[in-house]
Image (tube, rainbow, N blue to C red):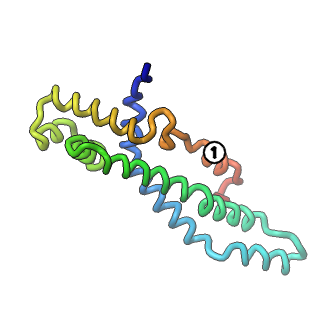
Amino acid sequence: MSRPVPYAKVEQWLWELPRWKARLELMREQLLRIPGLTQKFELVAIHGQGQKNEAILHQVIRKMQLQDIEIPWMELRIEVLEAVIRSLDPAYRQYVKDRYILRLPALTVMEKLGITHRTYYRRRKQALEQVYQFAGGRNSILDVPDMEFAHAEESYPPGQE
């Protein structure tokens, strides 16, 4: 017996794609703004009688976290979802692009595709089922929450993120 498709969750993945892309760009930008901190960290230890500046230490940790964990993770999620969208049947791919990527209202999508309400909702259901199936179903990497990143960011003192 197959498990039901969590349509709301799949829609959430599709709605989140533009936000994931923006977040990835922000993380890359953050990474560029933390250049050479490991060198500064070592200089502080040399000139500060061995006392390493905690604020710089937090920035070094943040840089490592961004480049080794968060950026590759976000890139993987985006690549998986974009590959899934490219793999959809053409009619479903067009629906997904119009509705979730371009964020067109449902009525506009219906008009653009020249379909009725009934066909629209059938296509929506079938497209979401394909996305879920192609993404790996209940074992999809898209379903893994970002909780470990949220907790890591919360561990920094205020103003040290």
Q: Is residue 5 shown left or right of residue 115?
A: right
Residue nearer the viewer, 42 or 80 = 80
Residue under numbered circle 1: 148
Q: Nearer the viewer, residue 23 or 130?
A: 130
Q: Residue at x 55, y 71 (%)?
A: 32
Neighbour tally class for label 1: few under 14, some 14-19, many 20 plus, Cα within 10 Å: few
Residue nearer the viewer, 152 or 72: 72
Residue 69 is situated, as x and y percent measured from the top left of the image, at 61, 56
Q: Is residue 131 left or right of residue 136?
A: left
Q: Where residue 38 sits in the image (x, y, percent)? A: 72, 73
Q: Nearer the viewer, residue 72 or 57?
A: 72
Q: Would you place residue 43 above or below residue 78 in this image?
A: below
Residue in the image at 31% along x and 50% along y? 86
Res 59 quadrant in image:
bottom right
Does residue 24 sit above or below 34 in this rendering? above
- Tell which residue pokes out farthest to the right in this image: 49
Residue 82 in the image: state x and y as whole percent.
Answer: 37, 51
> Residue 55, percent across and down?
73, 64
Position of the N terminus, as image quadrant, is: top left
Quarter containing the C terminus? bottom right
Q: In the image, is residue 65 above or below residue 3?
A: below
Q: Is residue 152 left or right of residue 132?
A: right
Q: Is residue 7 left or right of residue 153?
A: left
Q: Residue furthest front?
A: 1
> Which residue does the image show at 48% across and 32% down from the upper left?
138
Q: Amino acid at mark 1?
A: Glu
How many numbered dots are placed on residues in this image? 1
Q: Residue at x 66, y 49 (%)?
A: 152
Secondary structure under badge 1? helix
Quarter-of-image position of residue 72 = bottom right
